[in-house]
Amino acid sequence: MQPTPGSGSGDGTIVKMLPAHRRSYLGQQGKVALFHLLCSITGVWGSQVVVPERVNAVLGKNVTLPCQVEVGSNLTLTQSSWERRLPSGSVTVAVYNPQYGISIPPDYIHRLYFRSPSSHDATIVLGNVGYADVGIYTCKVATFPLGNTQDSTTVNVLVEPKVYVSAGSSALIDGGNDTVVATCIAERARPPAEVSWESNLFGQSEVQLFDEANGTTSTQVSYLWQPTRHVQGHALTCVVRHPALQSDFRIPYQLNVQFAPDISVVGYDGDWYVGRRNVQMTCKANANPPPNHFRWIRLDSEMQEGVEIMNSTLLFLRPLQRNDSGVYRCEVANDINLRSRDVRILIQDQSQAKRSNSIVVAGAVMGAVLALFLITVFIIVILTARMAPPPAFTDKVIDLPPTHKPPPPYSERAPAVPLGVHASQVAWLCQTRTADRRHELTGGQQPRTTRPGPPATRSPTQQLSRLQWVCHQSGTDQVYINHREHYV
C-alpha cells in the first residue's frame, strides 16, 4: 500500500484517520485557543479581579466582601459570582448575570445581597455574621471570549468585647491598706482584648484571662491602691483596645474614699467682750459619708443659761458675760468615726478697738512723763555742775612707773632710798626732820624732843648714817618713795 502524503508524520496520520468534520472542528478550536493566548499576552482582552487578602467580620454584625472587576474594552462580562470553600467542596452563595439578574441560594437569601452589581463591581454584603461564616470566599468573573477569572479572600470573625467596670468588694477608707479600687472587664472577646488603667495615682494593676467555651476570652484588670482622702472625687479611666472596635473604648470611674470628719469652727474672731450681742459659733465638717451627729459641750463648767444649740451652731441669745469664758468642744460623727474640735473663748472687758485706744493714750502719757523727767534731770545736772567749787587735790600722789606718769622735774626728785633700808627707818628719819623744823620755827623756845633712834639695821652696809634721806612734807607726815629708781 502506497503511503499518502504526510504519512511520515504521526500527526498527519491521526488527522487523516479522523473524519473530515472532526478535522475541521479541531482546526477552529486551535485557532481560537491560539488567539486567546495571544490576546492574553498582549493584554488586549485582559481582565482582573481585585479582592482584599483578609476581611474581619464582627460577630452579629454585617460584613462587606469587596470585589472589583477590571474588564478589557473588547471583553463582555457574562456573569459574576461568589463561591465558598467548604470541606465537602465549593458551594455558590451568590450569582449576578447581566441578562438574567441575581440568584442567591435559600440559605443566604435573607442575609446576603449585592451592594451595587455591575460589570465592574461584584461586592456582596453578608449580614448577621456568625462563627459558621468563617472561611475562604472566592469572587469569580466570567467574560466572553476570555473565560473565567477569580481571586479569593479569607473571612475572619471577630467578637467585640462587652466592656464594663465594677467597684471593688471593699469600701475605700482613708489610711487603709492596699485595696481593689475597681475592676475593668472586657468579656468574651475574640481575639482577647487589651485592657489597661490610666491614672496619676501610685497604684498597680493585676491582669487575669479566662478562656470561654465558644473560643472567646474574657480579660479582667483590677486596680489596687492605698486609699487617701486627698484624691476623693478624682477619676480613673479604663481603656480597652480591640480590632473589632473602631477606636479605643474608655470608661471613667470616680473614686469614692470614705474618711472621718475633718472639723473647723467659725464665728469666734478673738474679739468677744462683755456686752457683745448676736454672737455664735458654727461647727463645720468635711466627711464622707456626710456627718450624722453634731454636739456642743463645755469642758470647764456647765453650759450657761441663754446659750442654745441648734444643729451644728452654738447661739448666745443674750449679751456676753464674763463667765462665758471657757473651753467649748464640738463633736461630729459619721459612719467611719467620731472627731472633736476644742475652742478656748476669752471674754474681754471691752472691745479690741477700745483696748487699742486705751493703750495708745497710756503710751502717749507715759512718753510725755518720761520726756519731762529726762529734761528735769538734765537741767539739775547742768545747774549743779555750775554751782560746785573747783575740786581741791589734797591727796598725795604716789609716783607711778614711767609708763603711767612722766617723771617730775629734777628739783622735785627725792633722793633714792638704798636697797635694804627698812620702811620704819625712813619713817623715823622723816619724823626727826619734822621736829627739827618746828624747833627752828619757834626760835628754839620749845625743847627739842628726843626721839628714839632708828631701828637697827640688819647689816653694817645698811647703816642710816650712810643713807641719803629726803623727806618732802606737804601738810602731812606721809613719805613718798620714787619707784622709778631701782630701790624699794
Image (cartoon, rainbow, N blue to C red):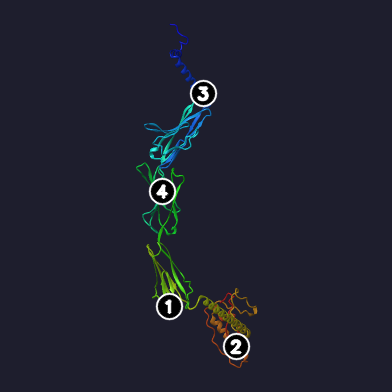
Mark 3 or mark 1, which is nearer the start of the sequence? 3
Mark 4 or mark 3, which is nearer the start of the sequence? 3
Measure the C-alpha gap from mark 2 to mark 4. Answer: 139 Å
SS for dot 3: helix
Where is mark 2, residue-wise? Answer: 436
Position of the N terminus, as image quadrant, is: top left
Query: Which of the two discs, 3 and 2, sits closer to the camera?
Result: 3
Measure the C-alpha gap from mark 1 to mark 3. Answer: 122 Å
Which one is nearer the viewer's eye here, 77 or 178? 77
Measure the C-alpha gap from mark 3 to mark 2. Answer: 178 Å
Amino acid type for the residue under numbered disc 2: Asp
Q: Circles 3 and 2: CB distance less than 8 Å?
A: no
Question: Percent x, y for residue 114?
Answer: 46, 36
Amino acid type for the residue under numbered disc 1: Asn
Mark 4 or mark 2, which is nearer the start of the sequence? 4
Amino acid type for the residue under numbered disc 3: Leu
Q: Residues within 10 Å of mark 2 (few under 14, many from 20)?
A: few
SS for dot 4: strand
Question: Percent x, y for residue 56?
Answer: 44, 39
SS for dot 1: helix
The disc placed on residue 323 is: 1
Q: Circles 2 and 4: CB distance less than 8 Å?
A: no
The disc placed on residue 163 is: 4
Figure quadrant of residue 135: top left
Amino acid type for the residue under numbered disc 4: Val
Q: Is residue 462 visible?
A: no
